[in-house]
Image: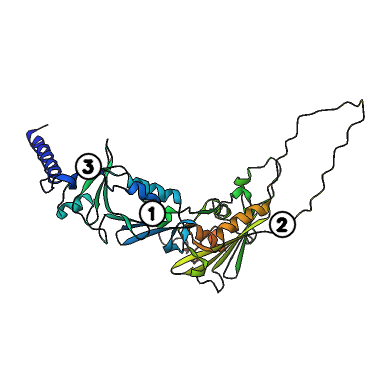
Amino acid sequence: MNAKTLGILAAAAVALAVVATTMHQSDQPGGEETALGPLSPGLQEGVNRAQTLRISSGDAVMEFQRGEAGWTSPAHDGFPVMGERVREALIQLARLEKKDALTRDPARWAALQLEEPGPGSEARGVQILGDGDPLLDLVLGKDKWGASPGIYARLAGQDQTWLCDGRVSLPRTATEWMEKRVGQVPMTDVASVVLERGGATLSVNRPEQAEGAAAAGAVDWLLAELPEGRALATPNPLGRIAGALGWLSFDDVRQAASIPHDGEPAFVARYTTKSDQQVEIRGWEADGKTWCQLAASFVGVVEPETPEQEAEDPPEGAAQDEGPPVIETPKEDPQVKVDEWNGTWTGWFYSFPATTLDLWKSELEGLLEPLPEPEEMTEEVPEEPAVVLPEGEGGGQG
């Protein structure tokens, strides 16, 4: 390592030392203002009184409120958020411990992402409200990684900044606080799918399989409207349509009353299961999004219950063939799952990712192999007849 490189490294080390020193300069008062301990004394006892959690980041503000039914998001018409996630965040905030007093100079706050929260700021503002009284008003900055992880923080309205022991998990979007999965119908349970859009219908069906054939999830699905002489695109695109309900999660959610849906839907998708359950998705365009209404029903025939017959005792002296005990698996009532789905979906409209919506908006031509390009017609030029010269003319040697 030459002298020039050593000089650069030494200068960098000095610069880092200067930065560290500026955060601990003599702009800090002594006494109680810089005393270590809980960042917000008394918050741990007050967590159970929390009624509102408000988080601001950039120009976005999330707010969650606690009511009789638990924590909800007012911005999503009162859709529930996961109470465990909110409680975890409240406890993490209450457990923050002051580890090191840093700068009180507002000009240096931005280096720790502790400037005032708002547009263009990396800082996050956190407020916890009780019954009308604030329990916490805090600015959170960068996370500090390393052997002793921590987070930079500043109590709102105060100049003193802190390095705190602890971690605070605050998802950046409101839907990340929610259970976004709204249903699960594995492709192996799907018997058929019907898509309706703009007067056109596409029917995706599972082919009949002989015993010992490929697994049910590995079938090549059939399209009833496949034109003669055309082929499905490769790989078979129908499997993605049939599997769209396998893990259905929303991007946004609103109450049904908030979404205009008086007219004809933009599309309808009907999934029928092997157990004769039907899931219907209707989509409407509003506010620049596609909003979907989900409903379930049982479309099969209810079989009448047959009375159980008591087994007759064998005659005395007859040999009894006691084979292995037969364990009967109780058959699940399809209506139970239908009621469970409707209990979750009724009253709500969901916005799903574009990749899922595009499947339900499929058009016939988009599912087929493209037609071959027509060959260019080239005009044939007739050959001119060869000129035969009389004997002795042209080319002869004199």
Q: Residue at x 59, y 56 (%)?
A: 341
Helix, strand or loop under label 2:
loop
**Which residue is labeled 1 in the image?**
50
From the viewer's perspective, is the residue at label 2 or at label 1 nearer?
Answer: 1
Q: Is residue 4 visible?
A: yes
Badge 2 vs badge 1, beta-carbon distance below 8 Å: no
Crowdedness of circle 2 by 10 Å Cα count: few (<14), some, many (20+)? few
Of residues 327 and 103, the one drawn nearer to the viewer in this rendering: 103
Q: Position of residue 64 (x, y in %)?
A: 40, 58
Could you tell whether 317 is left or right of 70 in the image? Answer: right
Instruction: Pinpoint residue 105: horizontal percent, then vertical percent.
Output: 14, 52
Q: Position of residue 79 (x, y in %)?
A: 47, 60
- Is tag 3's residue or tag 2's residue first in the polypeptide sequence? 3
Please name the residue shown 72% across and 36% down the image.
327
Quadrant including the N terminus:
top left
Distance from Cα at disc 3 to Cα at disc 2 = 68 Å
Residue denoted by label 2: 300
- In percent of width and height, residue 297 lies at 65, 59
Instruction: Provide the residue designation for mark 3.
Output: 36
Q: Amino acid at mark 3?
A: Leu
Mark on residue 352? none
Q: Earlier in the sequence, mark 3 or mark 1?
A: 3
| Mark 1 crowd level (few <14, some 14–19, many ≥20, 10 Å Cα) | many
What residue is drawn where x is 51% and y is 63%? Answer: 349
Residue at coordinates 41% horizontally, 58% vertically from top-left? 65
Spatial CA distance of label 2 from label 1 is 49 Å
Is residue 383 in sight in this rendering? Answer: no
**Of the residues shown, which amino acid type is indicated by label 1?**
Ala
